Image (cartoon, grey):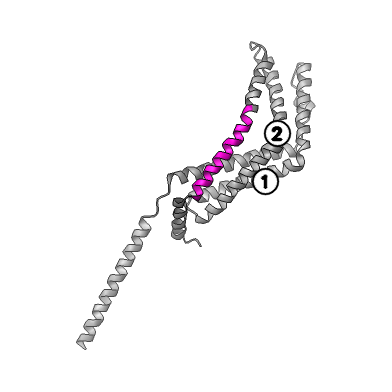
Amino acid sequence: MEATIGGGGGHAASLSKTLRHAILRGHRMTAAPRKRPFYLVVALLGAVVFGAYGALQGWSAFLQYRGAIDPALASQEIPNPDDRAAFVARLEACQAALDAVKTWGWPLAVAAIVLGSAMFVFAMRGLAGSSSARAILLQLVVVQAGVNVVEHRLLRGVFEADVNLWETAETTYIRENVPEWTHPEARTHAWGVTARSAYPFSLAAQTFGSALIVVALTRRRTREFFDASGQALGEQ
């Protein structure tokens, strides 16, 4: 009888010790989560910026396609008849360029809004440590980069018309409000040339940034971090 009691006590002590080790080990695992790589934080913040910027650009284009501007109303405050006629002509050319690409331009604007908003949401979820957000965000970044390439190729005429309209509007403003500036047409034309030159570089910069985000999201340390974070959060 005594031997049996003594054996039972030893078994209980051993079980209690095993449970204490398991609890302490689990506590250490919870207290020391895997460190988030710095490049991943930068990539996720970049995805937040790309998403917000893409959604805003899409919304701006959507408004352009949805509502036309009355040239007579827009130019009524321009006192000089020649400047007014030039502005009206540029504005009508801009609207004609928008109408020419409306068949695919309007869907691209909607796609930019949806993609940008989704990127913003899933990048924020990634910053919160959601493991399921990584795979979805990776796909969104790739698709947004593809949409940007299509927009730059198909909507080049709209961009040119916008720059021409801006040049005319700025020339009129300078002539009326900054008379000490001589040859305003040359000044605004030079600014327009700079904008046209930067147009392909903006696409290259966005594509390069998207590629860096993809690389950051597919690195081994990134996958390990999200796997560990998903387990800690109880994600499937």
Residue 209, how many percent across, how many down? Answer: 54, 40
Foreground mark, 2 or 1?
A: 2
Residue 198 among those drawn in magenta: yes
Q: Who is closer to the viewer here, 204 or 51?
A: 204
The image quadrant that residue 56 belongs to is top right
Residue shown at 69%/19% (left/top)?
A: 171
Residue shown at 60%/32% (left/top)?
A: 201
Residue shown at 62%/45% (left/top)?
A: 144
Residue 44, how many percent across, how many down? Answer: 50, 45
Amino acid at dot 1? Ala
Element marked by disc 1:
helix
Q: Which mark is residue 70?
A: none
Residue 178, how many percent across, how many down? Answer: 64, 14
The majority secondary structure of the magenta stretch comes to helix
Element marked by disc 2:
helix
Which span is picked out in magenta?
197-218
Callout 2: few (<14), some (14-19), or many (20+) C-alpha neighbours within 10 Å? some
Cα separation, mark 2 vs mark 1, equals 18 Å
Q: Which mark is residue 111?
A: 1
- Of mark 2 and mark 1, the one earlier in the sequence is 1
**Which residue is most to the bottom?**
1
Residue 221, how many percent across, how many down? Answer: 44, 51
* Quadrant where the image shows the N terminus: bottom left
Horizontal side of residue 22 vs 143, given as left or right: left
